[in-house]
Amino acid sequence: MSNNILNKNSILNKEDIEFIYNNYSEYVLRVIRELGDNYFPNTSGNVSTLIEYKGNKYILSTPSSVNSLKPKDKLKPFELSLIDLNNNLIYGLKQTSEINLHLEIYKNLDNVNYVIHTHPFYCTVFAVLNKKIETKIMPESYLKVPKILYVPYETPSTLNLATKVIQKIKKEGYFPVILFNHGLVVFGNDLDKLIDITKTIEHTAKTYFYCLIISKPKKIKYHKIKELEKLFLNYDERN
């Protein structure tokens, strides 16, 4: 363990902390390794995982980049922030200011064990323009990401933003979310799938961006979309 101090009010002891970090930190660090700096530029973005341990729930997340200014790929396991669902820091570096979004997703949505919030370049371009990314331009894009939700700008870190995201998801379904003037959020219980979806959306955004420069992109026709859905009905659980 590092020299971090365990919150004296926590019901967890040193052995508990070691067990949690030894068994769960790899999930968070793996996302950072696989997505890299293109998705977490200038220390931005955040990743978390929900932990159920001894009858209680905790969140292990990347820490505040404002406080540490440490690139995510330089983070060590015991520097990750361990908090409870009341946002009390138990161990590690100070939690990200955007943890409210993660907390509200875990509290309000079922079957969610991971939240990944990134700032990939092309997704962020569309977010800043307040424009939608068309996924019906390529079969793979549509099959993996049949729909993207869009949330109007709200100040990051606030409960207002988290509430708007939850309301949108509950109204329209468990789909990736683009926060206008901000970035991308994906969530679910399959980490491999979430990483793949994040990459797919960025690849689609990049393709769509250059298509818009050259000409008007041609969407796959409706009946062909339906044919795709019929052929690959079991390809994606689409939760």
Image (tube, rainbow, N blue to C red):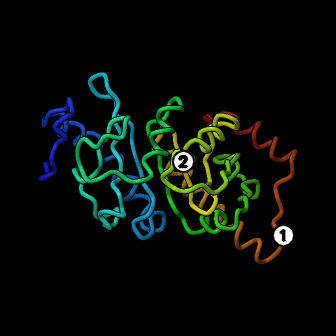
Q: Which residue is mark 1?
A: 216
With respect to residue 178, does 89 lie above or below? above
Give how far across and how far down residue 31 sits, in percent. Answer: 40, 53
Residue at the far bottom in the pictured view: 214
Q: On the rendered structure, is 35 left or right of 168?
A: left
Residue 56 vs 58, above or below: the answer is: above
Relative horizontal placement of residue 157, taking residue 201 as reference (left or right): left
Identify the element where label 1 is drawn.
loop
Q: At which x and y percent is residue 122?
A: 61, 68
| Viewer-side residue, 213 vs 62 | 62
Residue at 61% x, 49% y: name it: 177
Examine the image and state in which quarter residue 228 appears: top right
The mark total stands at 2
Residue sitting at x 84%, y 69%: 216
Q: Nearer the viewer, residue 209 or 124?
A: 124
What is the x, y in percent for residue 161? 57, 48
CA gap between label 1 and label 2 equals: 28 Å
Which circle marks residue 186 in the picture?
2
Q: Mark 1 is on which residue type?
A: Lys
